[in-house]
Image (spheres, coloured by chain):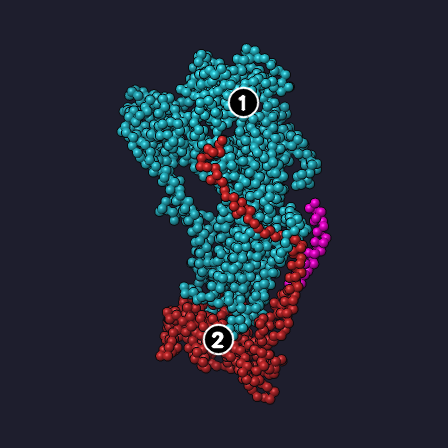
Amino acid sequence: MDFSSLRSLITRYCTGEESWVDSRTVYIGNKVPPPGTEAYILQRFPDNRIVSSKYTFWNFIPKNLFEQFRRIANFYFLIIFLVQLIIDTPTSPMTSGLPLFFVITVTAIKQGYEDWIRHKADNAVNQCPVHVIQRGKVERKQSQKLQVGDIVQVKENETFPCDLILLSTSREDGTCFVTTASLDGESSHKTYYAVQDTKAFNTAEEVETLHATIECEQPQPDLYKFVGRINIYLDRNEPIARPLGSENLLLRGATLKNTEYIHAVAIYTGMETKMALNYQSKSQKRSAVEKSMNAYLIVYLCILISKALINTVLKYVWQANPNRDEPWYNQKTETERQRHVLIRAFTDFLAFMVLFNYIIPVSMYVTVEMQKFLGSYFILWDDDMFDEELGERPLVNTSDLNEELGQVEYVFTDKTGTLTENNMELRECCVDGHVYVPHAICNGQILPGAAEMDMIDSSPGIDGKEREELFFRALCLCHTVQVKEEETVDGIKRGIHQGKSTSFYISSSPDEVALVEGMKRLGFTYLRLKDSHMEILNREEEMERFELLEVLNFDSVRRRMSVIVRSSSGEYYLFCKGADSSIFPRVVSGKVEQVRARVEHNAVEGLRTLCVAYKKLTHEEYEQTCHLLSSAKLCLHECDKKLAEAYDVIEKDFILLGATAVEDRLQDKAADTIESLHKAGMKVWVLTGDKMETAAATCYASRLFHRNTQILELTTKRTEEQSLHDVLFDLSRTVLRQHGSMTRDIFSGLSGDYQDYGLIIDGATLSAVLKPTRDVTSNGGNYKEIFLEICRNCSAVLCCRMAPLQKAQIVKLIKASKEHPITLAIGDGANDVSMILEAHVGIGIMGKEGRQAARNSDYAITKFKHLKKMLLVHGHYYYIRIAELVQYFFYKNVCFIFPQFLYQFFCGFSQQPLYDTAYLTLYNISFTSLPILLYSLMEQHINMDILKRDPSLYRDIAKNSLLRWPTFIYWTLLGVFNAVVFFFGAVFLFDNTTFTSNGQLMATNTQMMFGNWTFGTLVFTVLVFTVTLKLALDTHYWTWINHFVIWGSLLFYVIFSLLWGGIIWPFLNYQRMYYVFMQMLSSGPAWLSIILLIIVCLLPDVVKKVLCRALWPTTTERIQTKRQCLTAEQSTIFMLSQTSSSVSF
Amino acid sequence: MGKKQAGTGPLSRRPDNSAFKQQRLPAWSPSLTANTVLPTFYILSLVCLLLGIWLLITVENTHELKVDYTKAETCEECFSLRKSAIDSTTACTCTVSFHVPKTFPGDVFFYYGLRNFHQNLRRYMDSRDDAQMVGRKNNLKTPSSYCAPFDYDADRNPIAPCGAVANSMFNDSLTVMYNPMDGSKIQVPLYRKGIAWYTDKNVKFRNPPTNNTFPLQQAFERTTRPLYWQRPVYELDDTDSNNNGFINDDLIVWMREAAFPNFKKLYGVLNRAQGPFTEGLPAGNYTLSINYNFPVEPFRGRKELVISTVTWFGGQNYFLPIAYLVTSGLILVTAVVLTMVYVKVGKKGKNMEE
């Protein structure tokens, strides 16, 4: 009964706030602990129900509606709809209500369906049976009824129903094997341990008798961290306290393997499990296109409001004459007369808003979303991006960023597993300067190293022999590799055919597998870990057994790992392997110089090097170490820190044994991809945790650095000699001197004249650069800006020795620089997640280091080379498609609404709509929606092979070039022009002439004047045809689908109009459209003017395209023309051209 | 080795290799070049030119004459009488004489024109009940609320036809007299029927059901005439009982609201059965006598009689021929400019490609 628990008890009662409690106590089996030991506090925990669904049956409608109307656009349309319902407005509420209803319903159905699926999945999980020990018997229970403290029995291949503390297993040693494939994608088997004092309780009856409590921290999402303590009351005395760590914690979602059954106690249930806590949604990323779209939207909102204001003001100016306000033929009702003028003015303003509200189309959001959602399937379907080896397709986790793939300016790539295969193979090892090359044939043969290695003593003495064997043993022992003996592994692991059985080495680190396998080829085979003994088969086929005492696990800060073993002769060894930088400072003896030289030599060749060291421990030292470790492990607070301190004390005074070099081959076509990205105007940065030499070698191999690239180094080595300040200024001077003369060449890219710069920076220097300098240096010391300036002028940058968080920092730095470039991060490991989340577009590689990167990414691909097609082809297409979609949508609604605005000047600002209700409603929904949707799915302005072959085309769309303000203004002006043409064209036709329909066509008596609905229909017909044909002009890729929707929707318009005007609709209280369309078509002038107006509307656009193409062609257009010349394609009536990309001049 | 172990069978996850999914559908990719654009422009220009000329000739052959009688001659008196609503029931007739310089050949159409009369005000346009006009009995007795304040009279009797549109129906009657040289006066015979759309007359406008024992007047029982009307709807035409009620041609013509404040509506078509009108409207002097009822003074409007001939192309419409000619010219100019650009820049452009 210690003081701290008492204190926590007091705070618990005083605050009354459950969440303040930073640890929880779990009573195993929910049994009251022996009296007097500790007050029994009943804590309430959630049950084991997993709720990933958002809605329930009852709250679906209100909650979903609430969610949907939180979107600003939907809310806007709701307001418009309500205004229409409340006040007397020109158009019926149907016109905005129906599309809104449609949009809301479709979204609700989609979300409802998704939620239903989640519900089904939840139910399946929640209702699956689990075995719980109650009253000494195994009982079946539904998973959701599981409670904290229940003892659960899990059988082989079952999934853990909640987070459990392992009590006992069917194995004698109290271990079990688990795969966490569904949690983090690592399919390797991990070993978990039962607490030594409980492992004996391995039947249901025995477990029932266990009295113990568990104190542990409150749930937190980190999968790999857990601290706790178990108090076992064996015999009513003081309880035995044992530390609990993540090796005792079985996580929900993981699967039990190779173990018959286990008993474990539930500590975190339901939504408090680590898996559920990790479900937290990522922050929403928004694409640049979406931002421009919102900017346009605001412009249009302003246009809308100003239109309404202008008209309201003009209306009251016009109505100043009472005979106009209320002419004898149009008297008001009494209530209308009595209304206050301000109220009238306000309702008029609202009515104008309603009349013009279509300028912001409700359907644009739906179309954009559909385009993105459906469009993303082209990535999934792409056969070129299918990986046969893995049998995996690309993954699209979000379709919101499709077009962002066409806008990338900076590519941040991880090295290991992304640029390289992460398929490790031991190339050589070096023991005291002797180089060994493992090879299947020349097993264990000692090869002399490279010629310059003059320190090689070709015949190592007896001492050397001993050292050599110690080195091999060290590598065989110092690892966390497991041996899998059957062939039921579901990942791709390398199998080793042994004499008797097939076995695999499995580890979360491929380096380790490569090392152990390499050792096997050198004659030392690691067999298995059995009863805490590691078994090794040495060269003489003798079994050596070492007792594994402690494992000091690898972590990325220390960059090393150690094991403490006891040999059969009773000697204690500590073996350590790790990065050279973390080993060398801790070495006291050994041939440091030779090994260092070899390590550096290997690093330059692009190999991954590790150093191996050891020290002998006396029994006392071992005891001390043990004590140090266990006390560090036992704590509850700041455990990591204490552990790290303990490791630091233990891992020192090493004797250096040697070094290893593992080769990681470059991925297929990695160099080609990088070169293409360079040509496409992207800057490629490699961010890696590897050491500089290795990373630089990979960079050369992948052609990120060329032979003539001048390398600028910004590393600790240099900053040791000079101050950071001087180095930075030196570099920037070098770069800027060049910069003055090369500005002109910056876009041609290929000109051989100018010097190519490559920058290498390491983590330590980077943090120095980024550190906000407080000291008053002469130049203010804003290193960040200088650094960015240097980076901007380098074609390639390599950042090595990066911590995961630093990777994200770099991305953030570039993102926030003044050009606000679009960044892309690509990586495969958990260490890349932070940068993947930070970058505009995050791409994960489904590689060997688990699926964590892929899960957190926006898109996941299988190989680095697929990035090329993803960006250059898919990204390019998505961008031009969505750009056209957005511009076209605004354009067609300007065309649609501007005539209504003009009409107000002719109808006394009375808010008379120009078009019939049906036309107002259906214009955006059906007459003009499909062609643009299909265009935005199918368009290919250039063949995809050309896009792939000529990456410089990517520059044409860089910097959001199709959605810049000039382009937007051009489209808007084009829309206004078209609107003016078809409105005034029709006005002149109607106003000062006798516009009649000819009698002969229909009957003898139709020399009747046409009314306003005919006028509106005429304008609308020209509108629909113009807008659709404008899209036809922009289409470069006419598949049968395009033909079908473009001509089909025109035909649909005609058929609909015939039908709509052909019947007296019984449910309508007006029949204004009756036969209007037919009468119009029976009139010659109508036909002639429709044709003329369409031609006049399209003419300027065609001329603009032709002129721009001839005078200022973009690369894209040049290629199109070239292809045209080459293939000598049929000339046709349709004059088609590249869309507005010519604005970039 | 890993391939076969990859769980659910790697090949099942392989995407279909269809042309659609691989975005390789066969497609036609047209593009703008000089070869396509220039010929099209020249041809288009020519076609527009020919059409324009043809239309111009057609339009030249139509005749139109406008007689503004708002305050002309003796109508000045009536005009001022109609200023105030007090004397609305007092009849007022006046005559205006005009001269037709050339014979109007063929069918001649007589229109009445109004200026500054906004038939397109929103509330005005809505103030009608199509359901009533199509002869639904319920709507006859309970007019739509859109008709307010012209839905019920002061005694809560439903108005038929209700609404502002019907209420303000044009009610001048026009008679044109031909004055040949010999001093005689011949009334110009007009067809006053068959001037509305066939579909309007026969489908969209229907009287409430009647039969032999149940005349029209009875069908309109317990409704009242619009406030400004002098006669009830079932007595609009004295001469033809089939032209009464909602299917009265003048009413139907009026009910098709004009798009602009200046408009004209068909009043009648020349009856060419007997001379001297068999060839059309002969040149000479005419008098127009008007039963002047329709007040235009309050909104500063004008009233006129328009006499016009019609071709297949409609009335005297100079807009289309001129528009076609202008367009033709524009296309020609652009085509020439484009040709020049192509000749000059085309070579340079090619150099840039190389």
- Check if mark 2 and mark 1 are on a common chain: no
- Label 1 secondary element: loop
Residue B59 horizontal/vertical position (percent): 62, 72
Query: Label 1: chain?
Result: A
- Label 2 secondary element: helix
Rendered position, B330 above or below A837 = below
Q: Can you identify the residue that label 2 sits on?
A: B250
Task: Characterize the local packing of mark 2: few (<14), some (14-19) or many (20 or more) Cα atoms within 10 angstroms.
Answer: many
What residue appears at the point 58 percent right and 28 percent down from the top-left corner? A695
Q: Is residue B230 at all visible to an observer of this figure?
A: no
Rendered position, B131 above or below A491 = below
Give the quadrant of the N terminus of chain A: top left
Which of the two residues, A441 or A669, is positioned nearer the viewer here?
A441
Query: Label 2: chain?
Result: B
The reply, left or right, for residue A19 in relation to residue A905 is left
The tint of chain B in the picture is: red
What residue appears at the point 38 percent right and 49 percent down from the top-left corner? A61
Q: Main secondary structure of the magenta part?
A: helix
* Numbered circle sitting on residue A440: 1
What is the letter of the cyan chain?
A
The amino acid type of the residue labelled 2 equals Asp
Q: Which quadrant would residue B153 be assigned to in this image?
A: bottom left
State which region is magenta: B327-354
Rendered position, A298 above or below A658 = below
Marks 2/1: CA–CA distance: 107 Å
Residue A574 horizontal/vertical position (percent): 48, 17
Task: Characterize the local packing of mark 1: few (<14), some (14-19) or many (20 or more) Cα atoms within 10 angstroms.
Answer: few
